[in-house]
Amino acid sequence: MEESKRHLFDPADAVYRHEEFHLPASERDKLYQRILESSLIDPEYLTMLLLAGLLALFGLLQNSVAVIIGAMLISPLMDPILAAALALLTGDAKLGRKTAVVLGLSIGAVMAITAIVAWLVPLKEVTPEILARTNPNLLDLFIAFLSGLAGTLALRAGSTSYTILPGVAIAVAVVPPLAVVGYSLSTRHGAMAWGGFLLFITNLVSIMLSAALVFHLMGFRPRESTEEGQLKLRKRLAISALVLAVLAVPLVQTLRNAVGQIQTRSGIESVLNRAFRTKHSSVTDLAFSRRDGTLNIHATIRTTEYFEDKTIAAVQEDLRREFGSTARLEVDQLLVTQGGLSPQQVARLRDFISGRMVEPVQKEPPFDLRATEERLISHLQAQLDEVLAGTRVQRALPLRAELGGAGPLRLSLVLTSPEPLEPQTVKLLAAQLSQKFSVPVALSGQVKFAGPDFRGNLQLESPRRAFGADERKVVGGLAGRVLAHPGLRLRTSVPFPPSLPEADRVTIEKRIERLVTASGLRPEQWTLERVPAAETPQAPATGKPSAFPLTVQLEVFQEF
């Protein structure tokens, strides 16, 4: 009879026990039966699955790591995933169909219950724990692969699996990404839903491949031992590896971006610390962003003595040698006192309080509120550009900020984007800025769109001429975009030359109003603006300035 233990040992003397990793046929059959029985949907499995999904959702909404870990521990999804890996290796079609149904129903159930509950609960804000599961990288793939190895080994370990499997559940975390998908679907944020689902699929495929490898080492083989069975196995593994390779493409790019950000920050910190980190000063805050090829760096320094402009200029030159000639450094210096006051300082302070000044007070330069406000706005813009870096949304104009009382920091933005922003995207941006500034942030402003799909012109030959089919087509196309997306508006700009009589201006504006109203837009969905324009060349017949042909400019924009 084949034995798994090849060498007998005395537990009192030995410190190492050798065992054959290859399992005997009887133990393989027992393990196969155990996996088969544990991958069934029953009331207990379904209850634990839904509880895990709800706990993960509430932990994500409350930004509670402890609650999220609890959801990972009670999740039963690992069992059908390991069963799917065994079906992949052995080619058991019956087990494969069964686990596919179980996994499909489980995934759908978690996403459905989390989407419904996320829609019902009042908590809607995006938290750092949610954001952490919407941007997976290549390291998540390796973590899932190693977790699959550990989870499969835990099955072989028998009694010790009860101490191994909780750690595996925490490491691989298959339920929280599905909860993120449900939350994102309920809040209608497609990008976040895709990021969470990508993380889940990465974990699923990685675990299946690593588990199949361990099952192969245990002695499991395709049920068809013929050459055709081996060919089918290689085909299944090749397809799985191809799926994993496709998933790795966006993960590599995300990891590359993250590494680039870390390297840039590390390099900037190194340059700044060489100059500003002394016995009496240190760099306490650093923000950087790239915009239009320029690396904007903003640093805050706590110091007992101010650094001179020439020192800061020298540091900027060092940064330009390191990161290119477009690097720009802005520094805020906070003057602090190191240690206690000297006896001389105490005496002067006492004389000042008692009104007996023993020496004239040094006249300080007046406080420059405008310069301080400019530095604050510059710092806020650098933080905003850092958040927007790598996205298709960019800042178009300097922002305006308002901070008063106990309310939030109110930022007014003008952004550029190739497409309208969803409300959840604005909330996500506000949440990221709130995290950076450590204060609540409220956003408002406009979004401008690039491309001909959001712009148009109307040519008017005279104030009496009615608009034709071409003009109606232009307005209809832009009006359709406004009607299709809440928050969009149509801006109509008419450049009236100074010589145009007021009566003609009113006539033209009424014609434009009738044209836009006929397209289906309500008064609150569009605006008509007069913009200044230079005189056009003189008309050949009269020799007087002519306003025609007049070009009416149309632009679709978004308010938030």
Image (tube, rainbow, N blue to C red):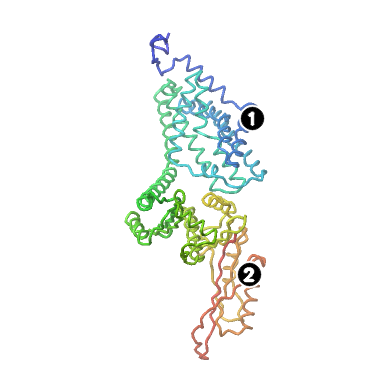
**Which residue is outermost to the bottom?**
542
Q: Is residue 272 left or right of residue 191?
A: left
Above or below, 159 relative to 42: above
Above or below, 223 relative to 485: above
Above or below, 280 relative to 116: below
User: How far across and how far down the image is residue 511, in percent?
Assistant: 63, 76
Residue of label 1: 47
Q: Quadrant of the C terminus?
A: bottom right
Between 266 and 74, the residue placed more toward the observer is 266
Rendered image quadrant of residue 329: bottom left
User: How far across and how far down the image is residue 26, in percent?
Assistant: 48, 14
Residue of label 2: 516
- Disc 1 residue type? Thr
- Asked whether residue 516 appears in the rendered view, the answer is yes
- Disc 2 residue type? Val
Rendered image quadrant of residue 23: top left
Q: CA distance from mark 1 to mark 2?
A: 56 Å
Query: Badge 2: few (under 14), some or many (20 or more) residues near its Cα, within 10 Å?
Result: many
Q: Quadrant of the N terminus?
A: top left
- Asked whether residue 364 appears in the rendered view, the answer is no
| SS for callout 1 | helix
User: How far across and how far down the image is residue 484, in percent?
Assistant: 61, 58
